[in-house]
Amino acid sequence: MTDQSRPDADTRTAPLPRGHVLPVVFSADPAVAAAATPRRMRRTGIAVGLIGGAAVIAGLALTQVTANLGYDNALSRYESTAEATSTTKTQVREAIADLRAVTGAAEQILAGGDQPIAVPEEVQAGLASALADGTTAASEADAVVATEIAGVGTKPGWFWELFGATSELEQRRHDLDVLSDELAVASTETADAHEAVAESGVAVINAAGAAAPAFEAAHLSARNEAVIALRAAAADATAATTMDDSEATSYLSLQDAAAHVVATESEELAEKSGPLLNARLEIEAFARSLAPGVLLDFDWSPVVSGAGYNGSMGGYTTWWWGESGRATIELSNSVAEQWPGIRSKALVAHEVGHAISVKCQSMYDSSTQDSIEKWATAWAISMGYTDDANGVWAYGYPPQNYIDAAAGCR
């Protein structure tokens, strides 16, 4: 019989009936758990660190990609805006050059001061005002196109640099938008100024051309060559539709021609001065009234065609077939001395008959001197000047068919 009270009988280690010996300490025991935890935490910490590092790397990579894409997009938009703005600047520069061309032409026109052919004051003032506005518009537009378009440097590498460069590109693009707006305003103002100067300049040129006939009529004693030049210059001025150096030259040529008209008239009047001046001018006016549209020069001498003394009168006419409307009549001083006698008028009518033949060449036979003189005599008769100083005394009476034909030459 076993004593159950023995102190060395440890019931904790005694085997159970048909059982196993269980460990003294179970896994839940703090000591055992403490031994197992460090190994597991080390494995978990490494995993978490790897995952966290990968996440950081992925985040940085995404940020770098985003920064690159943002910069590239900003750069593309900036370059597109810069190209469009540069094109606009080129167009505005061309517009400024065109404006300066017309303002330069206007300056030539207005620089002449007092000019022979005057234009209405309001027309002249209109050009002066447009010129002032155009000069201002060109200067202001110059200041706008002088604004530089900044270039783009090397693309940064890191995302923090890229973000800053992207912001800078956006600001520059905004500045270009502002510049584009300013260029649009400058373009409009330049175009408006160009139109105003051109229109007012053409108005001045046309007005001067239109005033030329009245100017010519006021200077009847000017020489034919000066009047012909005036008419040609006036035709150019009247036909002007644009404003440039060429048209400004046409205007100045017209004023030069007008000055020449004045100068030759002064010379002619000086040559005809003296006691017979008034009679000579009356005779010249009479001759012009008989042949409207024909330019007549007059030369006066003591003797013409061998006549001029002892009551005789002489005349001689030169005309140019290739230059219709132009002739020179030479008269002896005695024609003026006997003016306004019927004989003087008849002789002058005969000479005008020669001069007007430039308008009626096909009406008679101009192959012989006799037929030429018969024509001039017939023309004087057809005009009602029957005194034999009309050519009958010197060349005989013309045939009736000449008189009939001459009646159609006016």
Image (cartoon, helix red, strand yellow):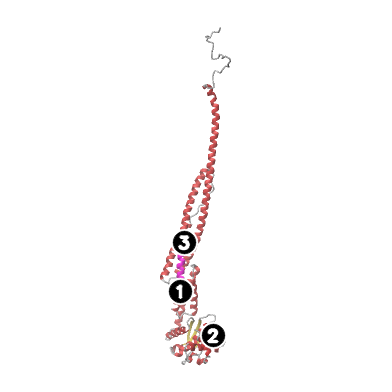
Number of numbered discs visible in the structure rendering: 3
Chief secondary structure of the magenta portion: helix
Rendered view: 20 above or below 369:
above
Question: What's the amino acid at mark 2?
Answer: Met
Label 2 vs label 3: CA separation? 60 Å
How crowded pointer 3 is (Cα within 10 Å; few <14, some 14-19, many 20+) is rated as many
Q: Quadrant of residue 110?
A: bottom left
What stretch of residues is rendered in magenta?
A: 188-211
Q: Which residue is mark 1?
A: 210
Along the polypeptide, which appears first: circle 2 or circle 1? 1
Query: Residue at point 44% right, 87% down?
Result: 336
Q: Which residue is mark 3?
A: 190
Say which mark, if any, is on residue 302: none
Q: Residue 295 at x, y = what percent?
A: 49, 81
Q: Which residue is mark 2?
A: 363
Label 1 vs label 3: CA separation? 30 Å
How crowded pointer 1 is (Cα within 10 Å; few <14, some 14-19, many 20+) is rated as some
How crowded pointer 2 is (Cα within 10 Å; few <14, some 14-19, many 20+) is rated as some
Q: Residue 87 at x, y = what percent?
A: 52, 57
Rendered view: 201 above or below 328:
above
Question: What's the amino acid at mark 3?
Answer: Thr
Callout in the foreground (2, 3): 2
Q: Is residue 272 magenta?
A: no
Along the polypeptide, which appears first: circle 1 or circle 3? 3
